[in-house]
Amino acid sequence: MSLQNPPVNSLSLEFLTDICISVEKLEMDKTCRGLIITSSLPKVFSAGLDIMEMYGKSPERCGEFWRAVQEMWLKLYGSNMVTIAAINGSSPAGGCLMSMTCDYRIMADNPRYSIGLNETQLGIVAPFWFKDTMTNTVGHRTTELSLQLGQMYNPAEALKIGLVDQLVPEDQVSHYSHTNHDQVTTPDRSKSMMRKPTIDKLTSKREADIQNFVSFITKDSIQKSIGMYLEMLKKRKR
Ligand SMILES: CCCCCCCC/C=C\C=C\CC(=O)SCCNC(=O)CCNC(=O)[C@H](O)C(C)(C)COP(=O)(O)OP(=O)(O)OC[C@H]1O[C@@H](n2cnc3c(N)ncnc32)[C@H](O)[C@@H]1OP(=O)(O)O
């Protein structure tokens, strides 16, 4: 599955819905042995959630958006397929979350790329299931530091903390993803055993999580922080 939503593969409601439909189709296809997620765009795996979906939108729309974010996570984290993230560019926030849902992460060894949960930099708190996914990937202490600082990691740092599993030359990300994928032939039952408690936690709190998100994101102070962050993104470009 090659992500293609220019300019930066931000996860809008529409794009998230497309991703969920694609994953669902693959999940039902008995001939499909697994999934490699990568990006069709240069330099960016995914810029994370589409910030415009969280800025100046109605509570109803925000709720619909958040349900789609949850759905993408539930589908990928709970997938019965063997999943590999072939991270061929930067992958902040929701992009990092998406790659952490996979069984294995291969990243392009380009020091200009970065990956991490940077929500704190936007003035927002990472949701508990983002935090849980990171804890399951890199451990409690690293997650605590990482979330408090909104830390982004270059590939070498990401490998060191276990946020990615392998670094490869940029032009060989696809080759190594396929080679690694071929070595794993059947999804292991231990995957669902390890992930079930985390998945059950969100499933049981799904509606409350949507309500929390909507009331948090529509607060004037949070809207102001997001607006300032958007301005900063645009200025940085010039
Ligand atoms: C009580 C508790 C309750 C719990 C509440 C929970 C609340 C949690 C809420 C939200 C969680 C959010 C998680 C997220 O994923 S938020 C998104 C975070 N993403 C980022 O911060 C990434 C920002 N982008 C970048 O760093 C760069 O764009 C990068 C991806 C590295 C690519 O760089 P480059 O190739 O140089 O591209 P540009 O920066 O020039 O960007 C091109 C245009 O795209 C726009 N852009 C970038 N990122 C996003 C995005 N995520 N959403 C929407 N738009 C984005 C950027 O502004 C440029 O636009 P323009 O051309 O119009 O200037």
Image (cartoon, rainbow, N blue to C red):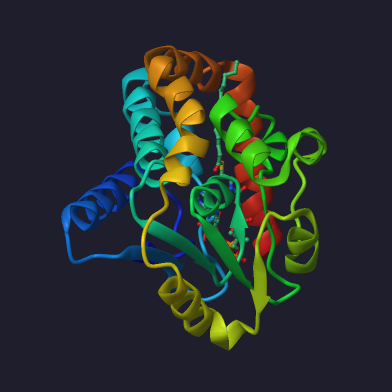
| Quadrant in the rendering for residue 156 | bottom right
Q: Is residue 42 left or right of residue 153?
A: left
| Quadrant in the rendering for residue 160 | bottom right
Q: Nearer the viewer, residue 184 or 179?
A: 184
Q: Residue at x 54, y 46 (%)?
A: 97
Q: Is residue 3 visible?
A: no
Name the spot of residue 175 as percent of width and height, x first: 49, 84
Q: Residue at x 78, y 54 (%)?
A: 161
| Quadrant in the rendering for residue 234 | bottom right
Q: Residue at x 24, y 65 (%)?
A: 32
Q: Residue at x 69, y 61 (%)?
A: 114
Q: Nearer the viewer, residue 237 or 161?
A: 161
Which residue is farthest bottom?
171
Count of picture labels:
0
Name the spot of residue 50 as percent of width and height, x first: 46, 45
Q: Is residue 204 above or below residue 167?
A: above
Q: Is residue 225 visible?
A: yes
Q: Nearer the viewer, residue 67 or 142?
A: 142
Name the spot of residue 130 as percent of width and height, x first: 57, 35
Quadrant of the rendering where the N terminus is positioned: bottom left
Q: Is residue 130 above or below residue 186?
A: above
Name the spot of residue 8 as percent of width and height, x first: 49, 62
Q: Is residue 87 left or right of residue 237?
A: left
Quadrant of the rendering where the C terminus is positioned: bottom right
Q: Is residue 157 above or below residue 14?
A: below
Q: Is residue 30 left or right of residue 206?
A: left
